[in-house]
Amino acid sequence: QVQLTESGGGLVQAGGSLRVSCAASGRTFSSYAMGWFRQAPGKEREFVATINWNGGNTNYADFVEGRFTISRDNAKNAVYLQMDSLKPEDTAIYYCARAWNQDSSSRVTHYDDWGQGTQVTVSS
């Protein structure tokens, strides 16, 4: 099992930027794909972005529209989500998750371990 800890959330004005980070424990971090999901109040958890084990493949939800970038640093056991041009509808708790294998995926069921989340609030 891998423990995941998110950080970097906060309050930002619309049009601003934030970078959220996820620190992972365990020596096998580099063997797995990682993902970012989010959950807004009263809504189901939804896929945001995913990256495969070596960073060579990334995928994003349609609503990202080129505004977010997922990246990872296997030497630091970390994955990041750079969010630019933020909108009020991006307000949510953002979770990082570890996939069960090397391949990236948008499916919640593809992920075994989840962090506690970090709150991102975008004001209008």
Image (tube, rainbow, N blue to C red):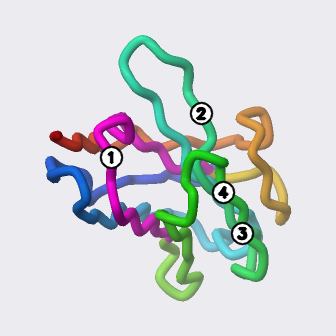
Counting residues from the N terminus, which is met first, the one under dot 1 or under dot 3?
3
Residue placed most toward the observer, 113 or 96: 96
Q: Which residue is mark 3?
A: 58
Q: Are marks 4 and 3 in contact (CB under 8 Å)?
A: yes
Q: Which percent across, then down, holds residue 121?
A: 23, 40
Dot in front, 1 or 2: 1
Q: Mark 2: few, some, or many residues within 10 Å (few <14, many ≥20)?
A: some
Question: Per the image, is 25 magenta?
Answer: no
Q: Amino acid at mark 2?
A: Glu
Residue 87, which numbered label?
1
Q: Which residue is mark 2?
A: 46
Q: Are marks 1 and 3 in contact (CB under 8 Å)?
A: no
| Above or below for 82 versus 113 | below
Q: CA distance from mark 1 to mark 2?
A: 16 Å
Counting residues from the N terminus, which is met first, the one under dot 2 or under dot 4?
2
Q: Which residue is mark 4?
A: 60
Residue shown at 53% from the left, 83% from the top: 73
